[in-house]
Amino acid sequence: MRLTKFSDLALRAVMRLAVTGDGESLTTREVAEAMNVPYTHMAKAVARLQHLGVLEARRGRGGGLELTGLGRGASVGWLLRELEGEEEVVTCEGDAPCPLRGACRLRGALRTAQEAFYSSLDPLTVADVVDSPTGPVLLTLTGRGAA
Ligand code: SF4
């Protein structure tokens, strides 16, 4: 199973914002630079995260992105389900649909495996994934020295 690039960079943004200290305020551009992704891609991810209620943008002087209470306590499994949507891990339908798609035991097994993947991430929170050593490294990323 492979996550979409969109989910990956949305999670990068959440992780960076999860370690934002008091008085620190990051814009979408700064988060994009710190996490080494194009600004336009990050802007789309930020918009989706705002829609989910995971983060909010404060406007004006001193404004910036901030995780909400929901975002700070969110489970990684829940977040990934929301970001990935209903997409299956195989393409059974589409322009060249598979002739087995209406009665395929493999398709059902893959759906079960996909759900097991998300379930295994349900107990993990955003706070968990920014524990040391990840959190201290996140704080060093400025976009200038970020790999
Ligand atoms: S064999 Fe089954 S899982 Fe694979 S594409 Fe066909 S319907 Fe989908």
Image (tube, helix red, strand yellow):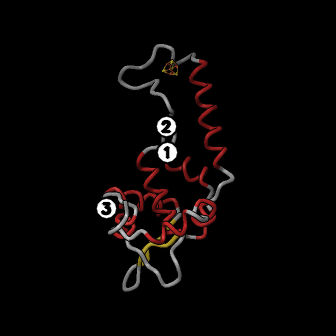
Q: In which quarter of the image is the C terminus?
A: bottom left
The three-letter amino acid code for the residue at tag 3 is Tyr
Dot 2 crowding, Cα within 10 Å, few <14, some 14–19, many 20+: few
Residue 84, numbered circle: 1
- Residue 105 horizontal/vertical position (percent): 61, 18
Q: In which quarter of the image is residue 146?
A: bottom left
Q: Distance between the residues labelled 1 and 3?
A: 20 Å
Which element is circle 2 on? loop
Q: Earlier in the sequence, mark 1 or mark 3?
A: 3
The three-letter amino acid code for the residue at tag 1 is Glu
- Residue 119 horizontal/vertical position (percent): 66, 44
Q: Earlier in the sequence, mark 3 or mark 2?
A: 3
The three-letter amino acid code for the residue at tag 2 is Glu
Residue occupied by mark 3: 39
Left or right? Give the position of 113 relative to 39: right
Residue occupied by mark 2: 87
Q: Distance between the residues labelled 1 and 2?
A: 7 Å
- Residue 122 horizontal/vertical position (percent): 66, 50
- Residue 139 horizontal/vertical position (percent): 48, 71
> Which one is nearer the viewer's eye here, 44 or 7?
7
Location of residue 65 with respect to 84 vertically, above or below: below
Location of residue 108 with respect to 38 vertically, above or below: above
Q: Quadrant of residue 98?
A: top left
Which element is circle 3 on? helix
Location of residue 107 with respect to 65 vertically, above or below: above
Please give the name of the residue rendered at 56% of the width and 47% of the height, measured from the top-left corner: 81
Please give the name of the residue rendered at 54% of the width and 18% of the height, measured from the top-left corner: 102
Dot 1 crowding, Cα within 10 Å, few <14, some 14–19, many 20+: some
Q: Quadrant of residue 36?
A: bottom left
Dot 3 crowding, Cα within 10 Å, few <14, some 14–19, many 20+: some
Circles 3 and 2: CB atoms closer than 8 Å: no
Query: Which mark is in front, 1 or 3?
Result: 3
